[in-house]
Amino acid sequence: MQNNVLILDFGSQYTQLIARRVRELNIFCEIKPYNHLPEDLSEYKAVILSGSPFSVRGDDAPHPDLSQIKGKKPLLAVCYGAQYLAHFNGGNVAPSSTREYGRAKLSFIDHSESFFEGISEGSQVWMSHSDTIKKLPEGAIKLASTHDVENAAYKLKDEDTYAIQFHPEVYHTTDGKKLLENFLVHIAGVAQTWTPDSFVETTVAELKAKIGDEKVILGLSGGVDSTVAAVLLHKAIGKHLHCIFVNNGLLRKNEFQSVLDQYEGMGLNVKGVDASARFLDSLEGESDPEKKRKAIGRVFVEVFDDESHLVEDAKWLAQGTIYPDVIESVSATGGPSATIKSHHNVGGLPDYMKLKVVEPLRMLFKDEVRRVGASLGIDKELLGRHPFPGPGLAIRILGDITREKVAILQEVDAIFINGLKEWGLYDKVWQAGAMLLPVNSVGVMGDERTYEKCVALRAVESTDGMTADWVNLPYEFLQKTSNDIINKVRGVNRVVYDISSKPPATIEWE
Ligand code: XMP
C-alpha cells in the first residue's frame, strides 16, 4: 500500500472522523492506538496525530516516542497532538485562561506556506481544548492565530511537521478538508487513488489469490454489509461462494422471498433456509428481551451449523465485518488501554467448525461499503435499506411472541415503511419501524366497543445508531398512516408516535 496514511490515536472522540475525511479525499488511511505504533513504518507516506481527552501534563497522558516519525515523515498534529508535539520539543503547554470550545475565526495566517493555500483569514475553525500552547518549541514558526488562541497553527523549521490546535475533521471547520488536502496531497505528496473502483479491483485480486478454488460459506442477512461482501466474493471466486440466507420468521412482511429473489437475480449461489418454526418454537412463552436475543442467537448458530455441514469441504467463513468493528481503540475513560471489539453478526460459530475467516470489508466505513456496493452495480434500493436488528421483530414485539403477533406487526410495519417510500420520506430517515405494545386499549368502531392492541411507530435520524433523534414526520403522513393501520390491520385500534431521543431512550424498545 504505497499511499497509506497512519493516524495515531490518542483517544479522541473525533479520530474516526479524521479517517473518514482523509478517505473522502480518496486517500487510504489506518488508525492505530498511539501505544501500538507499527514497527514497520515504511508503508506510510504521512502521519496524523489525533486529539485526546488527556492533558499532556497529566500522569496518565500518552507520551509516545515520536523520534521514528518526526522529521522523517510528513507529520500533522491535531489538538492534543499539537500540544504533545510542542511539549515533546521543549515548548510550554499550560491550562488556558479562557474557554476554548466551539467556533473561532482565524485572525492571522502566514501564507508563505502552502499549508494554508486557498484558506483566508476569517475562516471558521472548531476548537475543543482546555490546555493551550503558551510557548512554541525553539525554532517553530507560528502559522495561524485566532482571537483567543495565539498558537492556533505552527510548523517546525526545516521539517514537514505541522500542528494545528483546532479540529480540521469536524464539519464546523469550514476549510478543514482543504487543509487536510493541502497537507496530504501538496506537502506529503500522497496520491488520491483510493476509490471504490480501485478497492474492488485490488480486493478481488487479493481474494482470488488468498482463497484460490476453496469453498467459502457466508451468512446473508439482507443488510448492506453482508450483501456487498457476498458480491465482492462472488466476483472473485464465483460459485465457490456458498451463501446461506436464514428466515427466522421475524423478518419484515414478504422479506424472505423478495430478498432471496434479489440475491438470485444477482447471480449469487444462495440457499434460502426457512427455519421460522424452529425460531418461533424456541421463543414460546419467553418475554425477557435478553433471553429472546440469546434464544435467537443460539438457534441461528444451530441452523447455520447444520447448513454449513451440507457444504462439503468448506474451508472459509466470510463475514461482513466493517472497520468501526475492528479499530483498536484507546479508552477515553479507563486510561489508555487498547481493546478490540469483535463482530458476531452470525452469532459466533462453534470452534469445532475450524473455518478460516475472511472479511473483505474490514477496512471500510459504512458509507464506503455503500459506495463500493454502488461500484459493484448493486441495486440502489438495497444499498439504501434502513438497518434492521438481527433478532428482527422479536425485539419489537414487547413481551412474549406468538405467530399471530408477528403477523399483526408485519402488516403494521409494511404500511408504515411503504408509506414512507410513497411519500418520499424513506431516504430522509435513518431507521424506522413499528413496535407492538403489550397493552390493549378501548376503542369504538361503528357502534361497537373494541379492546385491542396499540402500536408505536418510530422513525429516527442518526449517523451510527449511537445517538439518534426522532424525525419530525409531517402530520398529514402520520394521520394517513394511522388511519390505514387501524382500518386495515385487524386487532389494532390505536397508533402512537415515539418522540424520544437516544439517549436517554434507545432506538429499539427492547
Ligand atoms: P438501540 O436500540 O440500542 O439500537 O438504540 C441501536 C441500533 O442497533 C440495532 N440493534 C440491534 N442489532 N442485534 C442487532 O443486530 C440486536 O440485538 C440489536 N439491538 C439493537 C438497532 O436496530 C439500531 O439500529
Image: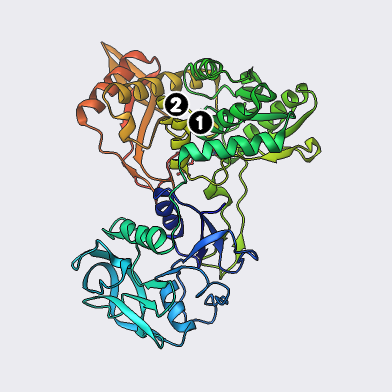
Residue 38 position, x and y percent, is: 62, 64
Q: Is mark 2 within 8 Å of ligand 1?
A: no
- Amino acid at the residue labelled 2: Leu
The residue identified by callout 2 is 382
Tell me what residue is drawn at x 37 percent, y 37 percent: 430
Q: Quadrant of residue 234?
A: top right
Please indicate whether residue 308 sits to the left or right of residue 40 in the image: right
Sort mark 2 into few (<14), some (14-19) or many (20+) by Cα contacts within 10 Å.
some
Q: Quadrant of residue 448?
A: top left
Residue 442 position, x and y percent, is: 33, 24
- Amino acid at the residue labelled 1: Gly
The residue identified by callout 1 is 223
Between the C-alphas of marks 2 and 1, the distance is: 8 Å
Q: How many dots with numbers?
A: 2
Residue 50 position, x and y percent, is: 45, 66
The disc placed on residue 259 is none
Q: Is residue 165 something that shows in the picture? A: yes
Up the image or down, 212 lies above or below 328; here it is: above
Sort mark 1 into few (<14), some (14-19) or many (20+) by Cα contacts within 10 Å.
some
**First-in-chain label (2 vs 1):** 1
Q: Quadrant of residue 168?
A: bottom left
Color style of the picture: rainbow
* Residue sitting nearer the eye, 255 or 447: 255
Please indicate whether residue 343 sits to the left or right of residue 461 in the image: right
SS label for mark 1: loop
Up the image or down, 456 lies above or below 187; here it is: above
Residue 119 position, x and y percent, is: 24, 63
